[in-house]
Image: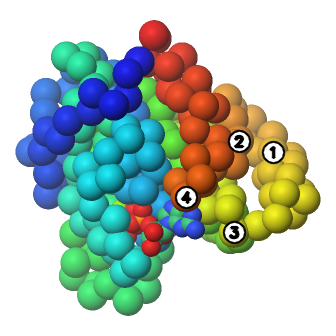
Amino acid sequence: INYQRATFLTSAPDIKALPADEGIEVAFAGRSNAGKSSALNTLTRQNSLARTSKTPGRTQLINTFSLDAERRLIDLPGYGFAKVPLAVKEKWQKSLAEYLMKRSSLKGLVVLMDIRHPLKDLDQDLIHWAVQSELEVLILLTKSDKLAVGARKKVLSEVREAAMAFMGNVTVHTFSSLNKQGLEELEQVLDTWYGA
Ligand code: GTP
Ligand code: MG
């Protein structure tokens, strides 16, 4: 798949506002500030396709991007950020949960975690839930440029070990939007999910 072809479709406050639930969708999920929007921009080679920010909680809507007539990429709001006002938090956590539970075209989840803070409780809950829902799961340990190669490999093997406990089809790779480490691996996994 040529990921450079991605174009913006819609920003949806809830699942009613999403494009028709057809074809194949892959969603990027993870804690606020994990690097979801940055990874989408790296994948699509477009600097400002998805909005990124130093301030956690930047992405508050379900942003959808089209790859072709049948395939879409989704940038989800992050979870686990304490400073967002409760009312706002409840609203988007609700649309996130609704999206994950009701979206039939959702084929797989890319779960992004900062390599320095992997597998927090909410990450584990999400992965468990995804495996039970028979979704494909790719764990991306993001910001791999923040660690030296040795430390990076150590975390990778620890998380791979831990991932076996999820009992599902869970793949783990390291990734950096800064130097594109892991980009090829990400594309290979997504190509198989999209059936290309
Ligand atoms: P929310 O939309 O708030 O949930 O955040 P997000 O997961 O979309 O994170 P975003 O892509 O906006 O990135 C958050 C911050 O991390 C920004 O300051 C990015 O520049 C930085 N960042 C993202 N990826 C990398 C990376 O691979 N390496 C480094 N060093 N910084 C990164
Ligand atoms: Mg974002």
Label 1: which secondary element? helix
Mark 2 residue CB less than 8 A from any atom of ligand 1? no
Label 2: which secondary element? strand
Disc 4 versus disc 2: nearer the observer: 4
How far apart are the two marked residues, 4 and 1, measured between alpha carbons? 23 Å
Disc on the earlier residue, 4 or 1:
1
From the image, which quarter does the C terminus lie in?
Answer: top left
Label 2: which residue? 172
User: What residue lies at 44% left-to-right and 46% top-to-bottom?
Assistant: 42
Q: Nearer the viewer, residue 2 or 67?
A: 2
Q: Are marks 1 and 2 in contact (CB under 8 Å)?
A: yes
Label 4: which residue? 178
How far apart are the two marked residues, 1 and 2, measured between alpha carbons? 6 Å
**Residue 167 percent across, percent down from the top left:** 74, 35
How far apart are the two marked residues, 4 and 3, measured between alpha carbons? 10 Å
Label 1: which residue? 160
From the image, which quarter does the N terminus lie in?
Answer: top left
Ligand 2 falls in which quarter? bottom left
Q: How many marks?
A: 4
Label 4: which secondary element? loop
**Residue 170 percent across, percent down from the top left:** 68, 35
Residue 146's tag is 3
Q: Is residue 128 left or right of residue 46?
A: right
Mark 4 residue CB less than 8 A from any atom of ligand 1? yes
Q: Are marks 4 and 1 in contact (CB under 8 Å)?
A: no
How far apart are the two marked residues, 4 and 2, measured between alpha carbons? 19 Å
**Residue 63 percent across, percent down from the top left:** 23, 49
Disc on the earlier residue, 1 or 2:
1
